[in-house]
Amino acid sequence: MRRKLLVASLALSWLALTTVGLVHREVAWVSVVFFVSGVYGSVLMAAGVLPRPRGAAPATGYRPFVSVIVPARNEQGVIADTVRCLCALDYAGPDGRARFEVIVVDHRSTDRTPQVLAALQRTHDFTVVRPTPEDGVGKAVALNVGLAAARGDAICVFDADARVAPDFLTRLVPYLGLPGVAGVQARKLVCNGGRNALIRAQEDDYTVFQTLTQRSRDRLGGAVILTGNGLITRRGCLETVGGWNEDALTEDIDLTIRYALCGWTVHYCEHVVVWEEAVPTWRGLIQQRTRWSEGSLRCLFDHGAALLGAPVPWRKRLDFLVFLSSSLVMALSMIASYAYLIEQWIYDATARRLSMADALPVREHQPLYTYYWIVVMVATVVAIAVERRLAPVALATASLRYIFFAMHQIVTLPLALWRYGRSVFTGRFEWTKTDHHGAALPELFASPPGPEPVLTGFGLRARAEAAVEAAPPP
């Protein structure tokens, strides 16, 4: 009921504001919203491109037993190589014995995933667990099932298409020993970026949102976000907040917020990388980004009020609220701007038809998206160029590609708002899985002493697998 009242009040307030704007032909507030959002994003970009420190993992001495959980539903194309990669992790105790386990949660797969896992278990040491028919759907359900079977004091989560270097845990786990740190997020990068323009655009997008903004938030004391793949958390902290929220579409963001409400923080470790597939089709991208935006809306309405009094610094609370509300603010502003543009078209057509253009009041054309796109796109493209050291020709191509790619928000943000409103009033809840295809995944060599892992080419095997007998084809 609280959600319904909140959503209804918001909808009526927005409708009243938009109606007043239509009547008085005044749309400056939309431009202000877009412009302020652009300035805020530009500040994050500026902080992100500053020279980044090069440091080794902290000597915390924290080296717990780690349970690696991999949710998998219809992942026959990628799960075998992911399991081989994770089983080859180099994380051992003083006695040389492995201090981790791999748990795959086969969540009601209807393809050949069960057969692939069964064949792989003949040559690799990992556990397969399956939810009961009474369990629900969604990644959070699978994670909680995996947590119940886990033995570790630290829980590491990977998606079914993840690829990491063998020393991933060795380099990431020590950060959990820092005071107040409940979770650590590795840097996510796209590993199949050369296939088509859409995937290359997502490669740029990951540079922005998985590297630059995470880095700047970590530097400025803002809201570093767990992103679902390549994260590790203390089991005690996870159990204190009740595990993963099975009602959340973005269980990673939800968990980050609940940690903040307890006064804990998430550390961003950009020197440790997890590689994953980008979505190869526009349809898949729309589904993925709509779910992400809808998940942010759910977190905003579930935790927004509590965040105001969270026991964390004010700048982190502000950043959380800006991050969570961006989908809502941008969606409402977009819909309002659509209404104003339609009004303008009708107005101009009527004036021309009646030959009364001089008699009708002249409307000042507000820039609407203009300021926003100029500010955001210039800042973003410059940041991408600096981070990736692009040559002028490559920069021009990347700029056009990313501007076109960013237009998906015109569809995904209003769609996410519609889906969330529908779920509040009807109880209809949908969780759309991102499909993985297993194409062009990277071959990772062991990381050198420096901060960056080495990507040596595109293939399906890690060098560490040479010491592990490959499973026979299922």
Image (cartoon, rainbow, N blue to C red):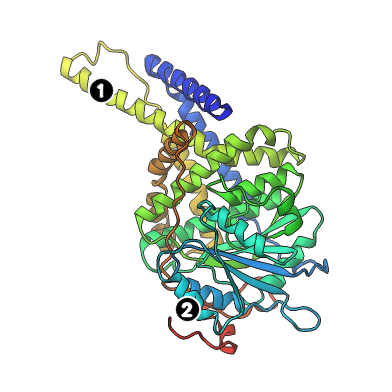
Q: Hey, which residue is sitting farthest top in the picture?
A: 359
Q: Nearer the viewer, residue 314 or 83?
A: 83
Question: Mark 1: few, some, or many residues within 10 Å (few <14, many ≥20)?
Answer: few
Q: Is residue 258 visible?
A: yes
> Could you tell whether 6 is left or right of 54 in the image?
left
Q: Nearer the viewer, residue 346 or 392?
A: 346
- Eyeballing the image, is 290 above or below 284? above
Q: How far apart in space, not on screen, are marks 2 and 1 (Cα)?
A: 56 Å
Q: Amino acid at mark 2?
A: Leu
Q: Secondary structure at mark 1?
A: helix
Q: Residue at x 39, y 46 (%)?
A: 407
Q: Secondary structure at mark 2?
A: loop
**Residue 94 sits in quarter:** bottom right
Where residue 346 appears, as percent x and y from the top left, is 25, 23
> Could you tell whether 268 is left or right of 382 in the image?
right
Quadrant in which the C terminus is drawn: bottom left
Q: Amino acid at mark 1?
A: Ile
Where residue 354 appears, as percent x and y from the top left, is 17, 15
Q: Which residue is mark 2?
A: 460
Identify the disc placed on residue 346: 1
Where residue 177 appears, as percent x and y from the top left, is 80, 62
